[in-house]
Amino acid sequence: MSIVNAKEIMIEAARGKYAVGAFNITDLIQLEAVVEAAKEKKAPLIIQTSVKPSKFLDRHVLVAIYRTLAEAAPIPICLHLDHCTDVEYCKQCADAGYTNIMIDASKQTFEENIRQSKEVVDYSHSVGNLSVEAELGTVSGVEDQVKVAEDEAALANPAQAAEFVERTGVDIFAPAIGTAHGVYKTKNPKIDFDRLGKINQILNGGGIKTPLVVHGGTGLPEDYIKRLIEMGGAKFNVSTELKHTLIDTTYEYIIANRDEYDPGKIDSAVKDAIRMAVGHWIDMLGSAGKA
Ligand code: 13P
C-alpha cells in the first residue's frame, strides 16, 4: 500500500470529506520530516518537489529515497512533480518513478494547455501507475520557476474546466480559485469557494472521477480550509510555510548556539520544526488516522 499515485488517495479523501496534505520539500531533512509526521499521524501523504529541487537533488536519487522510505512506511505515499512547465521533463520524471506529475501549461492558451496536458497524460499513463495533475486559470505568486503577477491571475471557468478535463483525460485537476503561492498579503484572502463547489459538482457530481487540488496552502485560515474541503478540495499544497520553517529554524538555532559545530543538531532542530508544522496541517486537513 505504500507506493501510490495521487489520484487513488485523493478519491478516498474526497469520499471521506478530508484532504491529503501535499508538502513541497527542497532537501532530504524536510523529506524525512514530512514522512515522519505522516507516519505519526497515520495519514496518507503526497511528497512534492518543484523542478529546481528535483534537478538539484537529481530525480533518480529522489525516487530511490522515496521508494526506500515509502516501501518501509505503513502509510500510502505519493511522489509528485510540482508545476513543471516542460513536457519533456515531465516525461523524464514519469520515467524516473515519480507517481504524480503536474504539467503546468496554465500560462498558455486554452488549446495549448490542453495539447501539452494531454501529451503528458498519455505518456504518463503508458509508463505505469501514475496520475497527472493540470491547472486551468492561473494561481498568482511565485512557485519555483513559475511566476504569475496578481493582475495576470485568472480564475478557472467552470464550463471550460469540464471541457479541459474531458479532452485531456487528466486524473486530478487544479482550478484557479483565488488562492496564491507565497504569503497572503491580507488575513482574509479573497477565495472563490463557490467556483470550486461548482466545478466539483460538474466534474464529480455523479461520483468522484477527477478529484480537485487547492494550491497556495500557506496562510489559509483554518475555517477556509474546512470550507474548501467541503467544496471538493482533496489535496492541499503547502510550500512556503515549510521553506520559512527550514530557514527560520536554522537561523534561530545558529544564533542561539553560535559556538557549536554539530550539523546533526541543526538538522534535528529543523526536522522537529517541520514535523510539527506538517502534523498541524494533517490535523487541519482531517487526514489523521485515514491511512
Ligand atoms: P504555498 O507556497 O502558498 O504554500 O503554495 C504551495 C503550492 O501551491 C505549491 O504548488
Image (cartoon, rainbow, N blue to C red):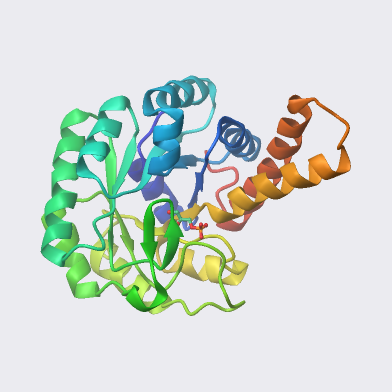
Which one is nearer the viewer's eye here, 224 or 246?
Answer: 246
Is the residue 233 above or below the residue 274 in the image? below
Relative placement, left or right, of 231 versus 247 is: left
Q: Position of residue 31 (x, y in %)?
A: 56, 34
Q: Residue furthest front?
A: 259
Residue 17 in picture, x, y percent from top left: 47, 58
Q: What's the residue at 41%, 41% (across, down)?
A: 52
Let me know if residue 54 appears in the view: yes
Instruction: Give the camera-side residue of 100 and 287.
Output: 100
Residue at the spot 27% in from the left edge and 50% down from the top edge:
85
Count of numbered labels shown in the rendering: 0
- Identified at 39% across, 71% down, the residue is 149
Whether residue 129 is visible here, answered yes or no, is no
Residue 123 position, x and y percent, is: 16, 37
With 214 as the anchor, is 155 left or right in this view? Answer: left
Question: Whole-percent x and y of residue 164?
Answer: 17, 62
The residue shown at (49%, 26%) is 70
Question: Looking at the picture, does residue 89 appear above or below residue 107?
Answer: above
Q: Is residue 4 above or below residue 217?
A: above
Q: Quadrant of residue 67?
A: top left
Q: Quadrant of the N terminus?
A: top left
Residue 30: name its quadrant.
top right
Left/right placement of residue 246 relative to residue 269 reads: left
Does residue 67 appear to the left or right of 257 in the view shown?
Answer: left
